[in-house]
């Protein structure tokens, strides 16, 4: 003979277990478990930007090491124009006016010497890894 009170107790426990599981799942949805889309958005964050200040007829820093895909922004703080011109032709900013800037996205790995075409004693080096 089946004890009806233990049978009812068993049914209540099973229902309570399902209810508890549903509560846990609902709480996880409210808290927000990161989805694949959010992880992809984090991975696609903007590339790092490095600054080179042009001032006093110098590039500062004179040598800069970056990774492919990162940006380099040269800002001219001198009262006259300058250029950022690779000695082997890989890039050329053309004239950057006073208070102007120029940005390059690092592409091919390598070492690039550059100078100002207006002031050839101004030199710099970009290393792309």
Image (spheres, helix red, strand yellow):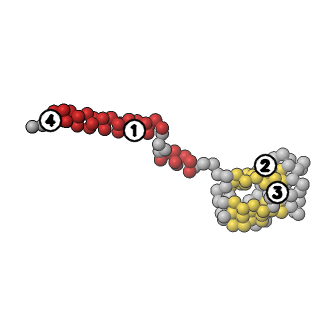
Q: Report how many numbered discs are placed on residues in the image.
A: 4
In the picture of the structure, the residue carrying the numbered disc 2 is 101
**Which one is in front in this view, the residue at disc 3 or the one at disc 2?**
3
State the residue at coordinates (83%, 63%): 123
Distance from the alpha carbon under mark 3 to that under mark 2? 14 Å
In the picture of the structure, the residue carrying the numbered disc 3 is 60
Q: What element carries label 2?
A: strand
Q: How crowded is mark 4: few (under 14 residues within 10 Å), some or many (20 or more)?
A: few
Q: How crowded is mark 1: few (under 14 residues within 10 Å), some or many (20 or more)?
A: few
State the residue at coordinates (90%, 54%): 56
**Which one is in front in this view, the residue at disc 2 or the one at disc 1?**
1
On screen, residue 22 versus residue 107, left or right, reads: left
> Vertically, is 112 above or below 49?
below
**Which one is in front in this view, the residue at disc 1 or the one at disc 4?**
4
x, y percentage for residue 69? 64, 56
In the picture of the structure, the residue carrying the numbered disc 4 is 3
State the residue at coordinates (9%, 37%): 1
Q: Is mark 4 on a helix, strand or loop?
A: loop
In the picture of the structure, the residue carrying the numbered disc 1 is 24
Q: Is mark 3 on a helix, strand or loop?
A: strand
């Amino acid at each position: 003979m089946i004890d009806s009170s233990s049978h009812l107790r068993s049914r209540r426990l099973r229902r309570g277990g399902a209810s508890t599981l549903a509560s846990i799942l609902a709480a996880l949805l409210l808290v927000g478990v990161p989805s694949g889309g959010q992880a992809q958005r984090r991975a696609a964050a903007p590339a790092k930007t490095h600054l080179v200040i042009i001032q006093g007829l110098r590039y500062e820093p004179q040598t800069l090491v970056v990774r492919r895909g990162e940006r380099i922004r040269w800002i001219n703080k001198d009262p006259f124009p300058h250029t950022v011109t690779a000695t082997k032709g890989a890039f050329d900013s053309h004239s950057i006016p006073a208070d102007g800037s120029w940005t390059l996205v690092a592409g091919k790995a390598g070492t690039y010497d550059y100078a100002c075409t207006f002031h050839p004693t101004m030199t710099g080096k970009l290393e792309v890894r």
